[in-house]
Amino acid sequence: MKKGKIYVIDGIPVEEFYLQNAGPITLLQNGDYDVLNEQGY
């Protein structure tokens, strides 16, 4: 079994940090339209 590294920024996983701190332009550029809809943009 392969163990992957979990990257952490300020004590939270990178994916969660990205979702909390990404602006609408960044989300559009990365194609995260579902997150945009959840945030109300």
Image (spheres, helix red, strand yellow):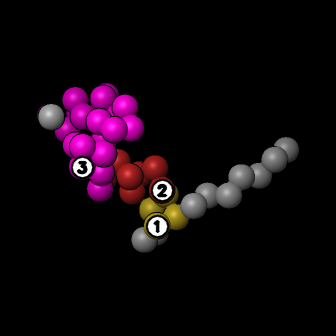
What residue is disc 2 on?
14
Q: Residue at x 42, y 71 (%)?
A: 10
Q: Amino acid at mark 1?
A: Ile
Q: Which residues are magenta?
A: 21-40
Q: Residue at x 30, y 29 (%)?
A: 33
Asked if marks 3 and 2 touch (Cβ < 8 Å), the reply is: no
Mark on residue 23?
3
Asked if marks 1 and 2 touch (Cβ < 8 Å), the reply is: yes
Quarter of the image that includes the N terminus: top right
Q: Amino acid at mark 2?
A: Val
Queried whether the magenta region covers residue 25, the answer comes back as: yes
The disc, 1 or 2, on the residue closer to the chain's N-terminal end is 1
Name the spot of residue 28 as percent of width and height, x first: 29, 36
Name the spot of residue 37 as percent of width and height, x first: 22, 29
- With 6 as the anchor, is 36 left or right in this view? left
Mark on residue 9?
1
